[in-house]
Amino acid sequence: MAFAEYTLTDTELVGMLHERGIRPSIQRIAVLACIANGRRHPTADEIYREISQHYPSLSRTTVYNSLHTLVEGGLVRELEIRSGTCNYDLAPQPRHSHFSCRRCGQIFDLPMPETVSSIDTGGFDIDSVDVIFRGLCPKCHKQTN
Amino acid sequence: MAFAEYTLTDTELVGMLHERGIRPSIQRIAVLACIANGRRHPTADEIYREISQHYPSLSRTTVYNSLHTLVEGGLVRELEIRSGTCNYDLAPQPRHSHFSCRRCGQIFDLPMPETVSSIDTGGFDIDSVDVIFRGLCPKCHKQTN
DNA sequence: TAACTATATTGTATTTATTACAAAGTTAGT
DNA sequence: ACTAACTTTGTAATAAATACAATATAGTTA
């Protein structure tokens, strides 16, 4: 799947932050850029490792703080797909599902399957639905099997 | 949803373990019972707290060991629905989806919606699909809103 | 621009879920 | 009952995330 396969400029990222009333610090821009560009659904740790290469004074806590701010501002979404850690996705995205590779742990976008039956939710108040496919990604499938 | 809403006897649980070649220790029976009866998709910690009431010498490590054994034996399934921890479900279950309450954290069963379109998986090797609804369970919905 | 206030970042310490591992205990088969 | 294999237990270690206080930065007012 290939939406948002282009790179957002700093100006665009700053604009997104401004719209939500979030002060556009270097760190926040970098965290948002890391999630928006690349489409790799990174974990907090992956974000930290990537950004701190270019910005050595970065603290892990700042990454977590920034992520919380971005999630609260609705720019970023937490994906609860793996039990050990959280992955982050750009929030304003077309409906799609996810694929979680059981070998490399990476998360990929897939199209969202259409549903026929709207199920009987029996009193449950539903905000959102996640569809998660699990298995081996093309790369890991080649290496293993 | 109300499948498996009956209590499995110790004899049945022991039978399940035997079938998979797992030695039916007190601890393993208790862990399996906790998951099979109650239908609450407990976490390792919830299992530990419940069982250790009746069996004070129980070690947390034993709970984890038992869970791994049961998962390997195919009797129990790990649900990766929340990023902080794992929930456990009895494995041989009819197709169903899950509902994760964002307030109390409990996980409930829901029917599985029928899909129309089988999506283009583009080279991904899919083992399983999880459908996860998120929102407020009936109880939390009353308390909050 | 200086002073003041509000907000962000950083580093350290802590918490929670889980795993590693070795010692002690238990079970099954001879 | 003896031995070998397997289980349980407790402690220590690891990983992800949070709490919090000190420092730094940005924004506002005079």
Image (cartoon, coloured by chain):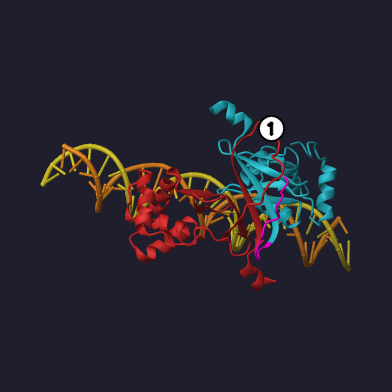
Chain colours: A cyan, B red, C orange, D yellow
Crowd around label 1: few <14 · some 14–19 · many ≥20 (10 Å): few
User: The disc numbered 1 marks a residue on which chain?
Assistant: B
Q: In the rendered image, which quarter is residue C3 located in?
A: bottom right
Camera-nearest residue between B31 and B45: B31
Q: In the rendered image, which quarter is residue B33 located in?
A: bottom left
Residue, far bottom: B143
Q: Residue at x 84, y 44 (%)?
A: A12
Give the magenta range: A114-125
In the image: residue A51, left or right of residue C15? right
Q: Percent x, y for residue B27?
A: 35, 55
Say if A118 sits above or below D15 in the image.
Answer: below
Q: Amino acid at mark 1?
A: Gly
Camera-nearest residue between C6 and B7: B7
Q: Percent x, y for residue A113?
A: 71, 44
Element on which disc 1 rests: loop
Viewer can see residue B123: yes
Q: Is residue B21 magenta?
A: no
Viewer can see residue B28: no
Q: Which residue is mark 1?
A: B122
Q: Residue at x 73, y 50 (%)?
A: A76
